[in-house]
Image (tube, helix red, strand yellow):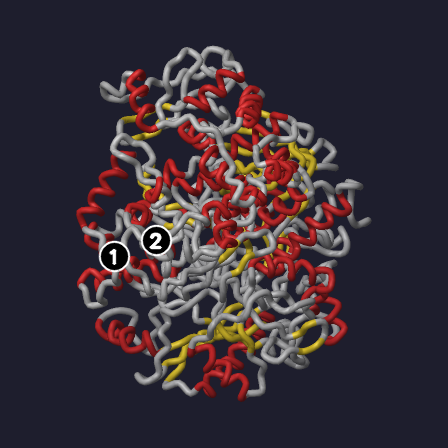
Amino acid sequence: MARIMPRKDVVIVGLGWTGSIVAQELTEEGLDVVALERGVWRATSEDFAVTNAQDEVRYRYRHELFESLSRQTLTFRNNMNEIALPMRQLGSFLPGTNVGGSGVHWNGQTWRFLPSDFVARSHNEERYGALPEDMTIQDWGVTYDDLEPHFTKFEFLCGIAGKAGNIKGELQPGGNPFEGWRSTEYPTPPMKMVYGPTLFAKASEELGYHPFPGPSANMSQAYTNPLGVSMAPCTYCGFCEKFACGNYSKATAETTILPVLMEKDNFTLRTESMVLRVLTDKQKTRATGVEYITAEGELVEQPADIVILAAYITHNVHLMLVSGIGQPYNPRTGEGLVGKNYAYQTMSGVTLFYDDDTWFNPFVGAGALGMCVDDFNGDNFDHTGLGFIGGGYLAQWQTNGRPIESQPTPEGTPKWGAQYKKAVRENYQHSISIGAHGAQMSYRQNYLDLDPTYRDAYGRPLLRMTFDFTENDYNMSNFLTDRLVDIAKVMNPKSYKVSRREGPYSIVPYQTTHNTGGHIMGASPADSVTNRFNQSWDLPNLFLMGAGNFPQNPGYNPTGTVAALAYHSAQAIREQYLSNPGPLVQA
Amino acid sequence: MMIRSSAIIFAGSTFIGLMASTAAMAIDANDWTMRQRGLYLTRAGDCAACHTVDENKPMAGDYALSTPFGTIYTANITPDEETGIGAWTADDFYRAMNEGIRPNGERLYPAFPYTHYTIVTREDSNAIFAYLNSLEPVRQQVREPEFPWPLSMRFALRGWNLLNFENEEFEPDPEKSDAWNRGKYLVEGLGHCAMCHSPKNIIGAVKEGDDAFTGGYAEGWWAPSLTGSTRDGIGDWSDEQLFDFLKHGRNDRTAAFGPMAEVVEVSTSHMTDEDVQAIVEYIRSIPAQETDEAEPMEDDDPAMQLGRTIYEAQCSACHAPDGSGVPGQFAALAGSSLAQSSNPTSLVRIILEGARAAQTERYPTRHVMPAFDWKLDDEEVAAVATYVRNAFGNAASPVSEDFVEDTREDIRKER
């Protein structure tokens, strides 16, 4: 029998980016909020101080900041004809754990999706006719215009460095001419460019493309956000992704919100509190709270008027499934919605090798230091006859020159031995990579459900992921990679090596931590788990945060949109739900 | 919760203006209840710094205060009848504040700043007493002082008082502004700033006259000079910088850390702008005392060369290659009075054990300087301390390895 805690207005599952955002917003409204975090507390000052060695073995290879699979993991298979097996080590994606979540170890590339991304089905059907039958993409139910103030709010929270390309419809020189309109310029100017990105920008400009500085959550200058929390200028140390920043130079929940949130009397954080399921009334008309287990193994029930799932997408979906909320998706019949439209990201790249006179100093880096072109993203170009929809941005990011992870060698170099070492020595300072960050359309056969065999440490079935790339992905990625090759040639290297996206999808090598879908949003309960405010259609006092709401995954990093959706949802709770608790959208 | 909200209400009041105009420190009791004034004055006196150990037991005392003579445990000043001051009268309380004498006639050790509180007015003393009496009584027996004989004999304090204590009333200086007089009342009285910021004589009494506020050793740190000296004092700080430092814990050149972070958090950040301004006006009138004339060391000095290498590798990411820091976040070392203090204890200590900046409403981020004690040896700490004392236009005596070793030992003992 679980110990029952006093009722709270709001319980939030997970204190990462979205948990912190909604906690900040709802405590401002005066609500009594408790956040349950499965991991531990951590802070720049204690855990990531600048005296701390940014040890690649410890962090990158031994996964110190990533979730531990010892209590809970997922099983994986490429298609329904295979038997899924449990992942015993993270690979293709690296979700975080502990306070701050994955936001602690992100790169900081902070995008807004294109206006047409939010209406992907209607927009593409209108322009290109019927889509493939198994492509299950849909409109989001929310539009770019709805989210614009919330994108802005997040960018000002973080002090994003960048150059606007479109302010209220007026194109701005030096920015991305394809982006949706912005109400205002970025809060801070772009980062100082290093040599590699400027070469990439020059070549793309020669080809008639439109290069612009990547939007960065690494600070280009000291910044104090509207909450009064301050961040310091980035030192370009090259340890962002997979690492925590010790210089207060990367926007994370901890460097932007938590110093204020943690001081509030109406906010409580309970760490090492692993939520096992969402509790509902018998008729499944409302969530009544959550059940969690403490580090000591005690079961605790936290009743609350509003339940907010802000865990990583796989865990949000898992909690829905193990709590029996909504109908699980069945790919054979197409019925059910929970677990539907899982999607990922389609990455490819070209590495360029130069002679001894061309120096890149790759160790001078930052997670979002680079130049990008958006000419081949979304529907920024005509897809007629190309055999795919969607696209991605192309970029030269100079993120790092970390000695273990960054050892680019030209085509034909052995994988080990004297020749390999010689090639690493010769090329470390003289090579750069350019990449395509491709979208992924959702397909009927890619989904999440509960595994029939394997269970976690708490006795719950594991989440099962069934996923592979599709024809649309390969066609799109090849097209984008060909554009990279065009640019690479103009950049005039000694040689270059092309890494195309080839199938089948492997969950082993790292690609991106951009998993999406599974509790998708939409305009109707017939095709979505959450409405435009990320409120459950089934249980109106249950809200789901994060990229699990994405019906498909556009060609950008997700964090900007994840945060904008969280602000959009929190605003709806503050301004509409509290005065009239119930469905915010009538089905 | 109650405490916080009443402070907010208080900040909007005008009674300080009324009070300053009479200069005699009479407070118009019609504006505020006595307890609310008492809360404010308790904060102005930074009482919680020594009397509150556990947030859930405010003012219950038993805080181990280390002095050069031994450890003393602070009094329980909650209204508990047996272990606190519940049986005291307002007269008893005033006598303790004014003369350092308990109701039973025992003398208080001067670690309790009655030597400063003696100028606190009877009205203010009454208000503080009223506030303390409104607290939850906490039953907490306070440990006996650990002093060697003859200091363990409280009557020995009679002699100490004869030498060092004068039972004064506050006399406003009619030549000075009301704000200056108010500032003096706060600084010399409740604020007891000199307890840390002035040097002490051999029996632990605060030195006065020219020595006043030239810096002092307190609680293992060097409280820097508050005089108008431009190098190791605050002569080159603007009034606004000093105001921001006291009110918000930071200014564009540095942050309060160590014991001063607590002073800001518990005391000065809760004071009204008018009172902080008054303190600024009084402190700014302390004349310059060149305590430690120095020429900058040569760049090719071996310690300077080693220090520079360490600085560039370990310090420059935050404090900037030219020592300019990041305003509001990381302290500027160029022109830093603390870096150039005649006594480098605090500089060495912050390098060894790090420090946490005060957290205030304006600066919610608690920036932390990490500890380097595990990373740099004595020679390296001495070199980098010497370097920051003499780089970026600074000038001060070098720091020796022995000094670092001793400071390390002091920190170890404290733990």
How far from the left and from the top, in percent, is residue A520?
67, 54
Q: Secondary structure at mark 1?
A: helix
For label 1, the residue is B386
Distance from Cα at disc 2 to Cα at disc 1: 15 Å
State the residue in front, A145 or B200: B200
Name the outermost residue toward the front. Answer: B175
Q: Chain of mark 1?
A: B
Q: In the depicted view, which residue is nearer to us: A474 or A153?
A: A153
Q: Which residue is mark 2?
A: B232
Q: Nearer the viewer, mark 2 or mark 1?
A: 2
- Residue type pointed to by label 2: Asp
**Residue in the picture at 41% in, 64% down:** A235
What residue is shown at x 66% (from left), y 65% (from top)?
A135
In the rendering, at what x and y percent does residue A187 appear?
Answer: 59, 65
Disc 2 is placed on an element classified as loop
How many numbered dots are placed on residues in this image?
A: 2
Is the residue under label 1 in contact with that under label 2 (CB below 8 Å)? no
Instruction: Residue type at mark 1: give it.
Output: Thr
